[in-house]
Amino acid sequence: MSLLTEANFGASLPIDGYGPGFFRVAGEVHYGNLWLMADQKGDWGGLDDFAALEALSGQIDLLFVGTGPQLAHLPKPLVDALEARGIMCEPMATPTAARSYNVLLSEGRRVGCALLAMPEKV
């Protein structure tokens, strides 16, 4: 017999849910694109917005990048900017990135995510 245990996020900011144009993070609704890590979150302008990701430098080792409803390639300048700061990035569809972030966050890993909001219709 196996038992499931509830994830323990402590004081960290997990993604509780998402829908068209929004994310629910630690019980609070955030509209639009979002970046977050264990204890911080903010608006993200999208794949060309490197400045918003500056707060992640030195704080995380891995960034999941949610590219919307489908997996998409990341722009090389974004990948280069993150790698120059010692951050490995992994593109995924937004739902997959949100789930992956939560799993590693619950393990206490130095992880973050930058998520494009889901559109009204997929």
Image: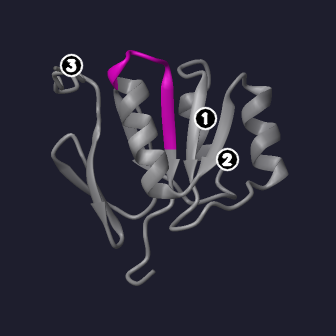
Name the residue located 52 percent from the left edge and 47 percent from the top edge. 114
Percent position of residue 112, x then y: 49, 33
Of badges 2 and 3, the one in the foreground is 3
- Picture disc at residue 69: none
Span colored in magenta: 106-113
Q: Is residue 78 left or right of residue 95?
A: right
* Disc with the residue nearer the chain's start (1 vs 3): 3
Asked if the residue under mark 2 is in contact with the one under mark 1, i.e. CB atoms within 8 Å, the reply is: yes
> Mark 1 — residue?
54
- The local secondary structure at tag 2 comes to loop
Name the residue located 67 percent from the left edge and 47 percent from the top edge. 50
Answer with the quarter of the image where residue 19 lies. Answer: bottom left
- Say if the magenta span includes residue 111: yes
Asked if the residue under mark 3 is in contact with the one under mark 2, i.e. CB atoms within 8 Å, the reply is: no
Local crowd size for mark 2, using a 10 Å CA cut-off: few (<14), some (14–19), many (≥20): some
Q: Is residue 12 left or right of residue 83?
A: left
Percent position of residue 10, x then y: 21, 19
Local crowd size for mark 3, using a 10 Å CA cut-off: few (<14), some (14–19), many (≥20): few
- Say if the magenta span includes residue 107: yes
Name the residue located 18 percent from the left edge and 49 percent from the top edge. 28
> Mark 2 — residue?
50
Kind of residue at badge 1: Glu
> Mark 3 — residue?
10
The N terminus lies in quadrant: top left
Q: What's the distance in space between the residues labelled 1 and 2, CA to CA? A: 7 Å
Q: What's the distance in space between the residues labelled 2 and 3, CA to CA? A: 29 Å
Height in image: 13 above or below 78? above
Answer with the quarter of the image where residue 8 lies. Answer: top left
- The local secondary structure at tag 3 comes to loop
